[in-house]
Amino acid sequence: MNFHILTLFPEMVMHGLNTSIIGRAIKNGLISIEAINIRDYSNNKFNKVDDYTYGGGAGMLMQAEPVYLAYKSVESNIQPNKKKRVIYVTPQGEPFTQKKAKELSQSDELIFLCGHYEGIDERVLEEIVTDYVSIGDYVLTGGELPTMVMIDAISRLVPGVLHNDLSAETESFHNNLLEYPQYSRPEVWRGKKVPDVILSGNTKEVEKWRLEQSIKRTKERRYDLYLKFKTSQKCIDVLKKNKLNYADMINVLEMGRANVIFEDENQILIQDEETLCYYYAPISEKADVISLINDMTLLTSMGESSTDSVLKIISHDCRTNKKLEDFYGGRAIKKEFAQLVYTQKNRLSIKAMRHPKVDINTFEVFNQDKTLAKVDMRTFGLPIVSEIKAENEEQGDLDFYKKTLLTALINDMLDLDVMPVFWFTDNEMSYFGKVIDTVYLYQAKEKVNIFFISK
Ligand SMILES: C[S@@+](CC[C@H](N)C(=O)[O-])C[C@H]1O[C@@H](n2cnc3c(N)ncnc32)[C@H](O)[C@@H]1O
């Protein structure tokens, strides 16, 4: 990933970012950071880039032209096929969050624009900026510190930047929970002992304790997050009453990847943060998917860009399908999929494992050290299509399972033109932070349908 910073103080950002983990990532070629001095693009003989604001008011404003020329110099070196975003750091922007960091980390080229004085002439912002982002509700003297904060948070999500890629998956904000307390040597420090459970060596107990502590800490320090966590748990409990049908929804919620958009006793609507796909579950007879989409202005609030001008909604039952088809007609394109669910039921002898050195969202299915398939979790959120026969679950038939699963996997990849996504019902397996052990399989009876609805 390449970062370009448009600033009046290049040395400030370059010094700040060239140390420790980010500095090492630059040296290792995982990321690159360049600072462009906006002053170099001044057409004034004193290199002046600011002027008084029209209409009066205190302070000076950065002028449009030097900013524009500095931007153009960067843009002209970026290939058109690269995913590019231009971020103006400003107290007037959307709040910078872990979610936003994740979203931006999917780009190839990020251009940061740092304001100074009273800010920047609005006209150039309208011309070049794609995202307005703030680091908090306070006003700083310049955009350099916010840019450094954002680049730091985004860089550590770039595969390979953290030695242990897993730590980014288990930290604060994952699943709306803050991280649990941690301890290092010595065991006793000034009379304070590390909790016994941590030293017990019992992994299950340690994990249980950590989850409890995370919940307790979130409740005490960030009640807003705690409420989100509770809502998502409540939805998981409801969906678990029909576990196999809603395995996909349970899975994205358990992975901390989805937001609950709406829930009451009649229906649940969630959204996968990464794929932006919605999942709908009618709970009672009163469920009304059409009103919900309209009330939440899901379609009308979609942007014009190619990625979000289509509403992707996953439906799990024929009544919802019919309602969507009747109401949206030709605007709704439907794709039907069998949902493959991994449960304790049927054991497969295939091991699936995240590749420690590859993208955090990718893992490989392998057998005897031979890679059989590579799976990307970041795609559409499409469950994989498969016809696995459940009768052959004897130990001796493991080869059959293996072959069928892989055939299905590979066919799906070819058919759908996207990499398939695995769903795991078992907690251990949805937790991508560690080696995923033996895979269990079950094919859900209900088909899932993905509707692509255009405006
Ligand atoms: C003094 S501020 C300008 C504030 C501007 N007059 C306003 O009221 O929104 C100067 C620059 O610092 C940066 N900045 C200040 N506070 C920020 C924050 N909380 N988040 C991101 N950038 C900020 C912006 O780039 C801004 O253009």
Image: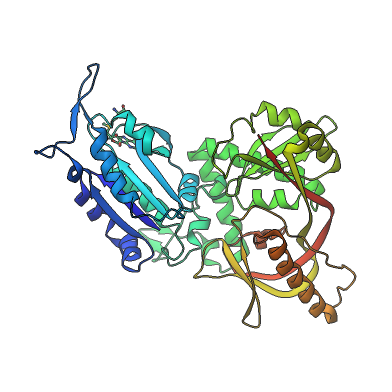
Residue 284 relative to residue 36: left or right: right
Picture mark count: 0
Residue 9 relative to residue 276: left or right: left
Q: Which residue is depicted at the point 80% across and 37% down?
A: 325
The answer to whether residue 57 is above or below residue 89 is above
Q: Quadrant of residue 89?
A: top left
- Residue sitting at the far top: 55
The answer to whether residue 263 is above or below residue 439 is above
Image location of residue 180, percent across then percent down: 50, 52
> Can I make out residue 195 in this image?
yes
- Residue sitting at the far left: 46
Q: Which residue is depicted at the point 30% across and 62% down?
A: 23
The answer to whether residue 125 is above or below residue 437 is above
Q: Quadrant of residue 229?
A: top right
> Can I make out residue 265 in this image?
no
Image location of residue 451, percent across then percent down: 73, 44
Image location of residue 342, percent across then percent down: 75, 62
The C terminus, quarter of image: top right
The N terminus, quarter of image: bottom left
The chosen color scheme is: rainbow
Image location of residue 191, percent across then percent down: 38, 58
| Nearer the observer, 164 or 324 | 324
Q: Quadrant of ligand 1?
A: top left
Residue 161 relative to residue 248: left or right: left
Q: Which residue is depicted at the point 61% across and 57% down?
A: 208
Q: Which residue is depicted at the point 47% across and 45% down?
A: 100
| Nearer the observer, 422 or 214 | 422
Q: Quadrant of residue 427?
A: bottom right
Residue 404 relative to residue 163: left or right: right
